[in-house]
Amino acid sequence: MCGIVGYIGQKDAVGIILNCLKKLEYRGYDSAGIATVCEDKIEVRRGMGKIAELEFRITEKPLTGTIGLGHTRWATHGIPSDRNAHPHVVGDLAVVHNGIIENYLTLKQDLESEGCVFTSDTDTEVIPHLIHKCILKGLKLEEAVIRALSYIKGSYALIVLRGQEPQKLIVARQESPLIIGVGEGEYFIASDIPALLSYTRKVMFLDDGDIAVVKSHGVDIRKLNGTLVTRQIQEVHWSPTLAEKAGYKHFMQKEIFEQPRAIIDTFRTRIRAGREISFEPLNLTRKGPPSINKIFIVACGTSWHAALVGKFMIEELCRIPVEVDLSSEFRYRNPILDERCLLILISQSGETADTLAALKEGKSKGTKTLAICNVVGSSLARNVDDVLYTYAGPEIGVASTKTFTTQLVALYLLAIHLGRMLNRIDMDYVERMIKDLVRLPHLVEEVLDREEEIKSLAKTYVHYDNFLYLGRGINYPIALEGALKLKEISYIHAEGYPAGEMKHGPIALIDEGMPVVVLAPKGNTFQKIMSNIEEVLARRGKIVVLTQKGNKELIYKANSVIYIPESNPLLIPILLTVPLQLLSYHIATLRGTDVDQPRNLAKSVTVE
Ligand code: AGP
């Protein structure tokens, strides 16, 4: 969702804020704005469009200052427009906000009845009005913000700047991420780490209910009730180059090609002597086999697809029943949880509002919690009993790629670890599983080497408007993921389906205008998939098949074949994913869509 940035120091705030906003554009990009203080007056440039538009506005009408704030918007309340772009200004106050003010309508009506004039359709605008009202009553800026927040229900990460108090920024957080970057005589504020990597790697993570007064020489952090709190400065290990395109046309393409490295980073430190998986810091298994009788895995979007694959891995190796839920469904269905359950939450960002809400639900019922997460210090990572980090590095493309395959690697490691702890698999088996995993990055490279082939396939299929993706068993979630990737970045309608279900409905859609992407690796359901292919061909559908080499039968039947290397069946989902990512990427670039920032989407969905 929206990205927010703040700066206070001695340098040109505008250049720094613009630069940080560009790194946050994946959070939202329908409008953008900046405010600074110049001679005790708030100066604002804002409007519809991306950061490039904002830069253009600033070139036309320059802005200066050594303190300021910025925003890149993903619309929730009010259409993308100049008037709805942040910062919102009331009196000499400017505010940027990420989140949703749930009671804004009532507050707005009250404020209007007192004579306040609103100039936008956003929920955010009630915040500067409330603060302004408190300032008129004689409160200092920080006191006014605290008072204003006491009226507000909902989620927020916000930064407040006042013309007459130009030596401080007030920042506050409730259920929306916010970090403070520490420099030399300067501070940076941002929604996400990548925004700050070019300036500092020392960060403080704010907690819910924190409010901070940030000055160039220090930060004072309190709870809303006034209690002083300390937030440790942590060192972030992501390098700034990981957040650059490095010669690739798009971040998404770069991130697809980073997968061999990301996979190695995710398993490297967890393998001992080639025959053991070690999660030393895992509370869950520290004192021996965990006493769990059921596992729930909860996630959204692509991470949910990883959860579906994880179910197969864990059930296969641990023989514990696993239930998979969408986070948004889980928390409202009163799930049957207790302290003998393990709740695994998967999230790239660790900030997805629905997944955080699912965590709350689990914790309230005494369940043990474990996160699989890519962002160190994220809300999810900080609030669970255990975290398994994926070391994919920052993912800037809105469509998840390397974070998905590394989630699958983390789940594979977890399944082996739990399986061994519970004595469901022996050491020799573990050794074989590890060998397969160590080979995986080379196999992914083999698939990546086929990019040109897949690109020419994209040319064949770019003009179709509907696609069906079919898979079975552990590869069915990959059909869902393939379809989601295509939808997200090319805006082509695509559906993923379990192949066996096709004849129960979707078969009605098949004709010569419907390419069907079939995931058909060798295995116990291969012959069944062959029958599904026949059923499609009999209705003149086009078949694109993904399989290992040597399946001659398929070569004669399919319109197009993409080969993947041979591997362990639990790792085949990863090898099937990579060509599907490339296929979507090339179809989208041929269609000329904005691959890294597809319409209507945002990288971190921090509102419910
Ligand atoms: C995937 O390409 C999407 N960007 C989206 O479905 C994403 O996976 C989902 O919003 C969950 O995000 P999270 O992993 O950060 O929780």
Image (tube, grey):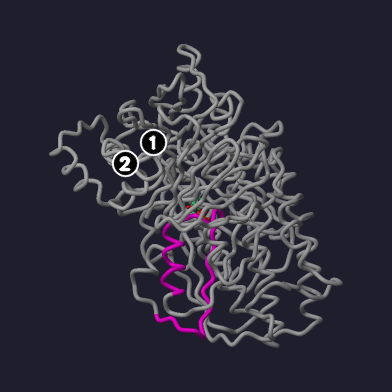
Q: Quadrant of residue 449?
A: top right
Q: Is 345 inside the magenta-drawn segment?
A: yes
- Observer-nearest of 487 and 36: 36
Asked if disc 1 and disc 2 are in contact, CB closer than 8 Å, the reply is yes
The residue at which mark 1 appears reads as: 95
- Observer-nearest of 156 and 306: 156
Secondary structure of the residue carrying numbered label 1: strand
The residue at which mark 2 appears reads as: 127
Secondary structure of the residue carrying numbered label 2: helix
Q: Magenta span covers which residues?
A: 336-363
Q: Does 197 sit above or below residue 496?
A: above
Q: Quadrant of residue 320?
A: bottom right
Please state which amino acid type lies under the numbered disc 2: Ile
Residue at (51, 82) in percent of width and height: 341
Residue 583 in picture, x, y percent from top left: 59, 44
Name of the residue lying farthest toward the right: 273
Name of the residue lying farthest toward the left: 113
On the question of residue 536 being in view, the answer is: no
Q: Is mark 2 within 8 Å of ligand 1?
A: no
Please state which amino acid type lies under the numbered disc 1: Val
Locate the N terminus by quadrant: top left
Residue 414 in picture, x, y percent from top left: 66, 72
N-term-proximal mark, 1 vs 2: 1
Residue 310 in picture, x, y percent from top left: 58, 69
Graded by Cα atoms within 10 Å as few (under 14), some (14 to 19) or many (20 or more), the crowding at tag 2 reads: many
Graded by Cα atoms within 10 Å as few (under 14), some (14 to 19) or many (20 or more), the crowding at tag 1 reads: many
Residue 551 in picture, x, y percent from top left: 69, 60
- Observer-nearest of 216 and 283: 216
How far apart are the two marked residues, 1 and 2, measured between alpha carbons?
8 Å
Q: Does 184 sit above or below residue 173?
A: above
